[in-house]
Amino acid sequence: MYDNGQNCGNCYLTVHMKERCYPLKVYRNVLKFSWLFTLRLYIIGTVVWQATIKSQYDGGRDVQKKRLHRFQDLNLVYFLALTIAGIINAFGVTMFLAPVKLFDSGISGTAMLVSQQTPEWCSLSLILVLLNIPIFLFGLKKQGRVFTIYSIYAVLVYSVTAWLITDVFPVDVTIASPLAETDLFLCVIFGGVISGCGSGLTVRFGGAIDGIDVVGVIFAKKIGLSLGSFVMIYNVLLYIICGIVLGSWILPLYPIVTYAAASKTVDFCVEGFERAKAAFIITTKPEEVCRVLSDTFENGITTIRARGYYSDSERIMIYFVVNRFQIG
């Protein structure tokens, strides 16, 4: 300890305090520590800032990847097939059904009725878009994004093609069918088959060209009906309303034939012409049963060992397949 005014031999600078003298080395160490601490803070801040920027950039890239991944399930071939389906459907409706005031089924039939009872600017193509697209958007959560995109695209192709045929192409579809003229039976058959072919192709390639299927999926179970029963009831009510509005039951009855022809064509397009049935037969006399089946159908037969759950006894299960021509 040194009194005030005394010089410390180890100091380069005399510091006068009340009781002790602090050397200059202490201040140099403090300054050095402060400088190093500040440098470290700067380095740490720079690293954290760069890491933050990188994470934001990577996060943006991840968002872009997720957005692109949403559309990876879409198939260009499917869009081509849906384009053909929409054109086929529009051809069947505008060339055979609409000219002779016949009606299609589902939302398409509703659009045809509305277009006939509204001014000319409310064309069939416009009403098809106004009725169908909100239904598909409403069913987006239920049906999925890919199905909704395919369906909206098919409806747009259908609507644009219908507009081209009725308003742009040099084809007169205002009085009679350009191909079947005023023969209602021919218009019903060909219109139903052709439009059914378009609808079936749309379903086969992941979409729907009529919003009634989406409505049925959403509401059928809630009211205790199957999808087929819901669509049938909707169409029956539609044809009854058409008869009341038109004041005649002749034209509304013909669409029943159209609906039958279109439904059968849709089944052929979706399931194919080669339909088969599989049968299982459980028996204790497999040799006799297999001999009869082989002589009758001339098909291959598979036998499988099976055991009953309650009886705990062994049986032979016979499995065989027959095509649609072999079904009586």
Image: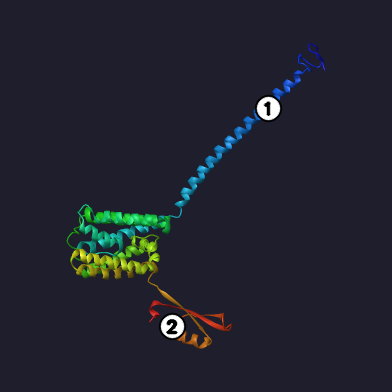
x and y, in percent, of residue 36 in the image = 68, 27
Looking at the image, can residue 79 be seen? no
Q: Which residue is mark 1?
A: 36
Q: Is residue 245 above or below residue 18?
A: below
Rendered-image quadrant of the N terminus:
top right
Q: Is residue 123 above or below residue 10?
A: below
Splitting the image into 4 quarters, where does residue 145 fall? bottom left
Select label 1 or label 2 by which is in front.
1
Q: Identify residue type, mark 1.
A: Leu
Splitting the image into 4 quarters, where does residue 268 fall? bottom left
Q: Is residue 157 above or below residue 102?
A: above
Instruction: Specify the farthest residue to the top.
Output: 5
Splitting the image into 4 quarters, where does residue 269 fall? bottom left
x and y, in percent, of residue 250 in the image = 20, 69
Q: Secondary structure at mark 2?
A: helix
Looking at the image, can residue 67 be seen? yes
Q: Residues within 10 Å of mark 1 (few under 14, many from 20)?
A: few
Q: Is residue 13 above or below residue 82?
A: above
x and y, in percent, of residue 19 in the image = 79, 17
The answer to which of 34 and 265 lies nearer the viewer is 34
Distance from Cα at disc 1 to Cα at disc 2: 94 Å
**In terms of sequence position, does the residue under pointer 1 or pointer 2 come before the other?**
1
Q: Which residue is mark 2?
A: 297
Q: Identify residue type, mark 2.
A: Phe
- Colour approach in the figure: rainbow
The answer to which of 183 and 209 lies nearer the viewer is 209
Residue at image location 49% in from the left, 45% down from the top: 63
Rendered-image quadrant of the C terminus:
bottom left
